[in-house]
Amino acid sequence: MLLVKKTLSVITMILLMGCGYQMVGKETHLPPGITSIAIPTFQNKTFEPGIEIPFTQGLLKEFILDRRVKVVDRAQADSILEGVVTNFYMYAVSFDLSGYAQEYQTLVVLDLTLKDRTGKVFWQENGFTESRWFRASSQILTNEANKQIAIQETGRFVAQRLRTRFFYNF
């Protein structure tokens, strides 16, 4: 009986070791030599004040938490990810029976460039878009707060999409 238990234990261990479990999240498809990145504050070419901040902060947070490349300042970085918020649109998408807006949609358009410290462009995308909806309110301050939340969420989702693209779809 003891021999059967030992044999079953050994077989179980062999099966568990060969079952395909492995640590994931370390693989990247980056060009060789990119171990650090600088993400300077995005430029804002819209009339929406401060819209560049949620996008810059979102990307910094995503890359810092990911830790596959080190986030450093421009002088120390192997690569630089620059962004420009080129357009911001906000328009009503649903109305009540009186014709008042019930929901708005925000749409943000970005131009993005990843280059090395010498200025060689690794990747560039113009017209990168993301949008979010928010509920309208008859209170002006509430409406503005809802718009700012939508912009913050847009920044977070853009950052997640760009981090994924940076590491997996380069």
Image (cartoon, rainbow, N blue to C red):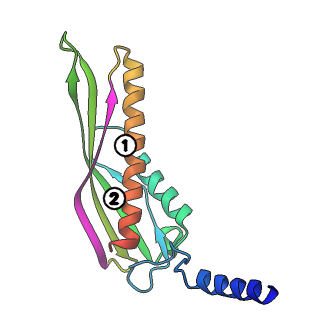
User: Image height check: is 78 above or below 59?
Assistant: below
118 and 135: which is toward the camera: 135
The C terminus is located in which quarter? bottom left
Badge 2 density bin: few <14, some 14–19, many ≥20, Cα 10 Å: many
Which residue is identified by label 1? 51
Residue 13 lies in the magenta stretch = no
Name the kind of residue labelled 1 in the image. Ile
Q: Residue at x 42, y 35 (%)?
A: 149
Residue 128 lies in the magenta stretch = yes
Q: Which residues are magenta?
A: 120-135
Name the kind of residue labelled 2 in the image. Gly
N-terminal label among 2 and 1: 1
- Looking at the image, residue 35 sits to the left or right of residue 85; the answer is right
Which residue is identified by label 2? 83
Q: Quadrant of residue 9?
A: bottom right
C-alpha separation, residue under disc 2 versus residue under disc 1: 12 Å
Q: Quadrant of residue 4?
A: bottom right
User: Image height check: is 11 above or below 150?
Assistant: below
